[in-house]
Amino acid sequence: MAGSVNGTPGFDLQPSSEQVALSSNYITNFDFLNQYLPDTYEKEFERYGNRTVASFLRLVGAEMPSNSDLIKWAEQGRLHSKYTKCTVNAAGVATTETWNVDLTQPGEISSTVAVRKGQTVMLTKNNGGANFKALVTKSGTADGLTASQVELAYYTILPAGVVADEYTMFVYGSEFKKGTAGMEGSLEADDVFFENKPIILKDRYAVSGSDMAQIGWVEVTTENGATGYLWYLKSEHETRLRFDDYLETAMLEAVPAAVSSGAAAALGNGTAVANTPTGAGSEGVFYVVNNRGNVWSGGNPNVLGDFDSIIQRLDKQGSIEENVIFVDRQFGFDIDDMLAAQNSYGAGGTSYGLFDNDQEMALNLGFTGFRRGYDFYKSDWKYLNDPTMRGGLPTGAGSGRINGLLVPAGSTSVYDQILGKNAKRPFLHVRYRASETEDRRYKTWITGSAGGAQTSSLDAMEVNFLSERAVCTLGANNFFLFQE
């Protein structure tokens, strides 16, 4: 009989942090008239386990310094020439005709057609029904045409099916008569340049000197191992842990501020770059992959046919051999079920993986990866499951819910504008501001007159946190974002 998880009692989303010190932060039971004094546990119970969500960038990336407001790099363009929208003037009435090449299509960034006289090309009608080959006899302004025109001599008398329609054209070689001069003109490497800017992140914790002298009644502990009986110690360490999480989630979620936006008006005093003309905001991983990468929408891919579509797209990109898919819990289950269904016993749940499960062995219903064209490794991503972060978003179109992210493994070679040379970089890495005198990777300092600090007359201890950083998503065309 099918059932469901009851809505109540459910998980608690009440924040554990407040901006003021409350009696709920520590025990204050001073009722001496009560003959039944409570038995108390000295140690705080960690009912939510490890509450931090940071770890993703530490697993897949690296951190390196930068001394500029602008981070700029170049990525390789395609090696071969192909144009996806070509039209013929006279529609197949002569053996040699002039063709127009639309240079405004996505990915075609050159201002002059990169096809030269003497090269051989293949043309295919975009909606099917015709394909043929031709020799380039004229190309561009050097031969009296426009910068986006070529003259083609067909290898057949009159190609069948040539009509005034849109064609795709690519170069596959060249052919010259005996005793003629060599190829006219040359091609220059056409790199694609990208850039990003760092953002400044800050946090602060403050406690008065008098409150620091208050003895708590419960031993507290935090995820980084800090323990003690002072209630303010827990709040200070939780501020640090929260800031650590924000250092990662800001790199994932950051977006550039649009012109005339409220954020641009409040923060528009930084360096303006191509995609952040206001100088506010930055390009986070999700923003970059959504705009320059690959996106799967409309539910999780849960059959091999879905992954075949993903693989065919990866074939058209960088064809990176090994990839890691960081998934939420449901996406992980969908992949497990898909792989289990490939086994004839999988539907009954009796034989998963490499081993035959028996009564002496715990049944393993999960998979860590699979190979189909490429190697795919699956890893749960706590950030997508945490109900206080993206795990608490509703499902459905337009909800902003992300179910997974495919990240290519390894590193890539790019031309670093700051270093002035090629350098190996992980596909994902963080650049933080630093120089010989100032390191802004992770700054923390104490001010006030309490807690050992003697920097001002303020009767309090203030713990300050600061970082200035940006994430660089290299080769975004090799990433896949899985979203509703």
Image (tube, rainbow, N blue to C red):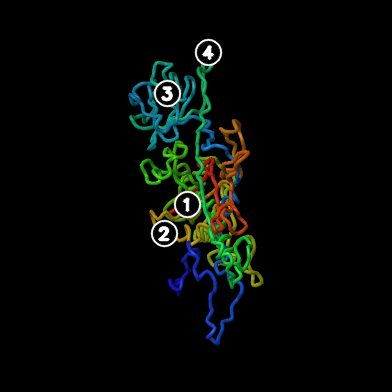
Instruction: Please give the label number shown on residue 482.
Output: 1
Residue furthest toward the bottom? 35
> In terms of sequence position, does the residue under pointer 1 or pointer 3 come before the other?
3
Q: Which residue is mark 3?
A: 154
Q: Label 1 sits on what residue type?
A: Phe
Which label sits in the foreground, 4 or 3? Answer: 4
Instruction: Please give the label number shown on residue 180.
Output: 4
Nearer to the camera, 118 or 414? 414
Crowdedness of circle 1 by 10 Å Cα count: few (<14), some, many (20+)? many
Nearer to the camera, 265 or 183? 265
Alpha carbons under labels 1 and 4: distance apart: 54 Å
Q: Identify the image quadrant of residue 68.
A: top right
Q: Percent x, y for residue 416?
A: 57, 34
Q: Residue at x 54, y 56 (%)?
A: 458
Q: Which residue is mark 2?
A: 395
Helix, strand or loop for disc 3:
strand
Alpha carbons under labels 4 and 3: distance apart: 20 Å
> In terms of sequence position, does the residue under pointer 4 or pointer 3 come before the other?
3
Helix, strand or loop for disc 4:
loop
Q: Percent x, y for residue 15?
A: 48, 64
